[in-house]
Amino acid sequence: MQDLIIGSLESLEQEFQSDELAYLALTTKIELPFRDRWAFSLYRTLKETYAVSREWKRTDMAILNGQSPEVLIELKAMYSFDAVLDKFKISRFADAMTSDAKKARLLAEAETEIYTVLLSTHPEGPFPPEMAHIVKYVSGINKAVNRCGSGQKVQHAAHEAINKTLRDRNVVATGSLDGGRAFLNGVVIDYWLVRA
């Protein structure tokens, strides 16, 4: 199943309308619409042989063979500025991923594949202050861009911090999904897929 999981994640941006992923990433908790769209994509692919469930026994996503979990997936979401502005915050996200994997193991059977996914929303640049009540975390986004000098440098610094934090884990895929543009800003969702 691992190749199927990776392939579906790599192509997930195609499941969103133009600029939809950018808009959602800037205005909501992105792991929820991300999970929902990913689950539906997997459902369409697997519906003849497996059931795909959201929030199965409090697990973000499950691929089931009858009542037996074949795959359990947990997602965590952050912003690129989280890894840049607070060097300890990325460790808290990694700890949460570990906790999610332990929780999933309690539901797993011997052959169940368990994955955790870290999503990092990365806006390309700063926002005007008046966007603070529309776009989530404007002050953190702007502070990171000011500290690093550009949005590209924020993303690079976040990648370094996340890769360093996850270096001892079984990262089976990383990548970036182009979210499009929202509020005059390009948005990328970077991801790290870890197999527990």
Image (spheres, rainbow, N blue to C red):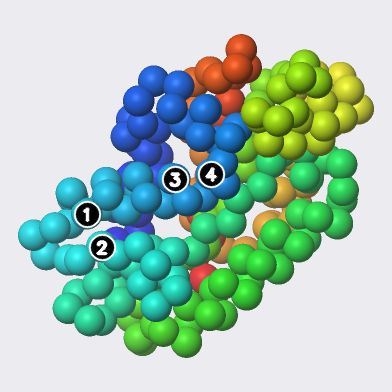
Query: Along the line of sight, which residue is nearer the eye, 83 or 166?
Result: 83
Give the mark, 1 or 4, whose residue is nearer the N terminus: 4
Image quadrant of residue 68? bottom left
Q: Given the image, on which type of amino acid does mark 1 rest?
A: Tyr
Question: Badge 3: how crowded within 10 Å, few (<14), some, or many (20+)?
Answer: many
Q: Which mark is residue 43?
A: 1
Residue 143: percent from the left, percent from the top? 87, 30
Q: Residue at x 35, y 63 (%)?
A: 54
Label 3, secondary structure: give it.
helix
Q: Given the image, on which type of amino acid does mark 2 rest?
A: Val
- Distance, label 3 to label 4, CA atoms, is 6 Å
Give the mark, 2 or 3, whose residue is nearer the N terminus: 3
Q: Which mark is residue 52?
A: 2
Q: Which mark is residue 158?
A: none
Q: Residue at x 36, y 86 (%)?
A: 110
Q: Given the image, on which type of amino acid does mark 4 rest?
A: Ile
Give the mark, 4 or 2, whose residue is nearer the N terminus: 4
Q: Residue at x 47, y 31 (%)?
A: 21
The residue beneath circle 3 is: 34
Residue 3 in view (yes/no): no
The residue beneath circle 4 is: 30
Q: Given the image, on which type of amino acid does mark 3 rest?
A: Phe
Q: Residue at x 18, y 50 (%)?
A: 45
Discs 4, 2 touching: Cβ within 8 Å: no
